[in-house]
Amino acid sequence: PSRSIVNFSAGPSALPYEVLEIVQRELVSFAETGLSVMELSHRSATFSKIIHNAETLVRELLKVPENYSVLFLQGGGNGQFASVALNLINLKPKKSADYVITGYWSDRAAIEARKYGTVNTVLPKTDKYESIPPLEEWNLDPEASYVYICDNETINGVEFHEDITRALNGVPLVADCSSNLFSRPIDVSKYGLIFAGAQKNFGPAGVTLVIVRNDLIGHAMTECPTIFDYKIQAGNNSLFQTPPTFGIYVCGLVFEWLKKHGGMEQIGKVNQMKADLVYEAIDNSKGFYNSPVVAKDRSRMTIPFRICVDGKPNDALEKEFLAEADKKNNLKELKGHRSVGGIRAAIFNAISLEEIETLVFFMKDFQQRHQ
Ligand code: PMP
């Protein structure tokens, strides 16, 4: 199954068409209950099965070790910016955390954490996020409660590809994987906590997945709102308050789809091929297309680029590119984030290799007509 529109939105993003069709089929009556999932009590046996199945698939797909809890929460990435600090900043007496700021979203997280404790910025301040400085240059504090990274900076297109835990001296690593969780295999045991909003790679907006090592649970500040306390949520199997039931159901279907399509190894390979095609088109364009990010730190998921004339970004040509992409080619939502401008291709799991070929064909054709 497919459709003629390709949706490159960075979030909420494309969902697998097969999943949307299942949702449509089951919308008014789920599993012969005569009720929509939206109408089921979160305490019903049917919903218990749905959330249990979703959790089991997360554990299976990501090979989550036994000593980690899988939580389906609300509040999105921004909610976790606060939750992480509220739950973990007290882990060490210094109440200080190390923030590795590699783009817009890790910067936002650090600003939020400062409300609850001390934030040590590990890297020199910059407003150009185009690479990750080598580990040897990081100003890490061995007394930090945790080290925080954004694994894929959705706006700036900077992604971690290296195992950084060797430099952390056992300080727990917290990663915002909102725009790359389920895009490739991940060794969960290297992390203290991983969180992600579902709306990019694995579900609709409204569900926030948290995978947290059990020894990091139970250290929340007294001021931590009850719904944000990992201990309360883990103790209640994510059912402390009414959870986003419909969203969790859709996430479960996406997890089934990921499994059906070969699991993380295979999905990771396809995602790498997709990203390679786009970067090849950029790098072989003789400077017409320009990616600001150094090759080793380039994102496989969110690819910002500029269209240049005489080495300078050209707003008029970018406008034309976007209009032609949208109106004539059904390639939607390619506009870059307002803070950086230009073009951005967010190529999450639901975008197929064939759809990337269509984009690359258009890019080459547009270049030929305008260079
Ligand atoms: N982190 C990352 C990496 C993101 O891309 C986003 C949203 N685009 C957020 C956090 C914020 O998430 P939310 O809008 O769910 O609060």
Image (cartoon, rainbow, N blue to C red):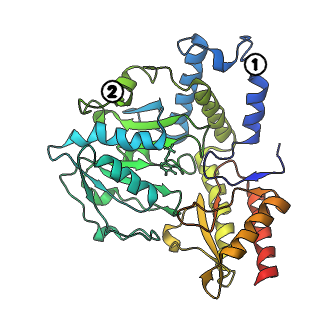
Which quadrant holds the N terminus?
A: top right
Q: Is residue 282 above or below residue 350?
A: below
| Residues at marks 2 and 1, CA–CA distance in whole angstroms | 35 Å
Question: Which of pointers 2 and 1 indicates the residue nearer the eye?
Answer: 1
Residue type marked 1: Val
Numbered circle sitting on residue 231 = 2
Badge number at residue 220: none
The relative height of residue 310 versus residue 158 in the rendered view (above or below) is below
The answer to whether the residue bearing label 2 lies less than 8 angstroms from the nearest atom of ligand 1 is no
Please determine whether, in this image, residue 133 is positioned above or below residue 56. Answer: below
Residue under label 1: 28
Nearest the eye: 1 or 326: 326
- Secondary structure at numbered mark 1: loop
Q: Where is residue 273 in the image (x, y as percent from the top left)?
A: 66, 62
Residue at 69% in and 47% down: 350
Where does the C terminus fall, quadrant-wise? bottom right
Residue 325 is situated, as x and y percent measured from the top left of the image, at 78, 63
Residue 353 appears at what percent x and percent y?
74, 57
- Give the crowd class for mark 2: few <14, some 14-19, many >=20 residues within 10 Å: some
Residue 344 in the figure: left or right of residue 352 = left
Q: Which of marks 2 and 1 is nearer the N terminus?
A: 1
Is residue 150 shown to the viewer in this render?
Answer: no
Q: Which of 164 and 365 is in front in this view?
A: 365
Q: Give the image quarter of residue 24.
A: top right
Q: Is mark 2 on a helix, strand or loop?
A: helix
Tell me what residue is drawn at x 62 percent, y 43 percent: 263
Q: Is residue 172 above or below residue 247?
A: below
Decide: marks 2, 1 in contact (CB < 8 A)? no
Few, some or many C-alpha atoms within 10 Å of disc 1 (few <14, some 14-19, many ≥20)?
some
Q: What residue do we see at 71% from left, 18% from top?
A: 30
